[in-house]
Amino acid sequence: MLGIKKADIILCLAIIAAGIILTLIIGFAGSSGTKVVITAGGSLYGIYDLDEDREITIKQGSHINKVTIKDSTVSMVFSDCPNQICVSHKSISKTNESITCLPNKVMVTIEGDREGGYDAVSG
């Protein structure tokens, strides 16, 4: 019968520790964004400053979503979609974070200032 050896336990703990560390690094290393990009139905709806508090109502056909920018964070405060996952999503503020309403095809994404810089694709 093969048993669990001390080296197996150490390896398992090392993998778990590495996973926790990577999760923390990825979760806290995102830079603060500067722009809120909203797409609706696959098309650009608008680009807004993250520092300017406002409420945006997105109407497409009979569907409505409301997005609030407040205190440099963004949240989906209303949607007429059935599952309400987008409304219960936490507020976002860091580059590449997003809130998506799949039934209404609305996506809210945080982007940084790209002037003079490179992103992962170009550089």
Image (cartoon, rainbow, N blue to C red):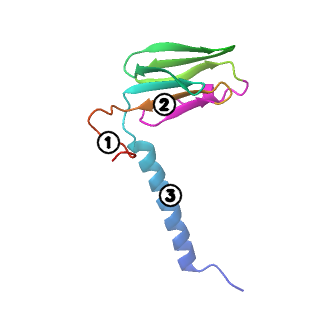
Instruction: Find disc 2 in the rendering and name its residue.
Output: 109
* Horizontal arrangement in the rendering, residue 34 relative to residue 61 (left or right): left
Residue type beneath disc 3: Gly
Residue 86: mark in rendering: none
CA–CA distance between discs 1 and 2? Answer: 18 Å
The residue most toward the left is 116
Instruction: Find disc 1 in the rendering and name its residue.
Output: 118
How would you rate the neighbour count of disc 1 (Cα within 10 Å): few for under 14, some for 14-19, many for 20 or more?
Answer: few
Quadrant of res 73: top left
Residue type beneath disc 2: Thr
Q: Are marks 1 and 3 in contact (CB under 8 Å)?
A: no
Q: Which residues are magenta?
A: 82-101
Residue 19: mark in rendering: 3
Residue type beneath disc 1: Tyr
Which of discs 1 and 3 lies nearer the camera? The answer is 1
Q: Quadrant of the N terminus?
A: bottom right
* Residue 106, horizontal then vertical, whole percent: 59, 25
Which of discs 1 and 2 lies nearer the camera? The answer is 1
* Residue 66, horizontal then vertical, whole percent: 57, 16
Which of discs 2 and 3 lies nearer the camera? The answer is 2
- Point out the tag, 2 or 3, that comes first from the N-terminus: 3
Is residue 16 or residue 87 the one in the foreground? Answer: 87
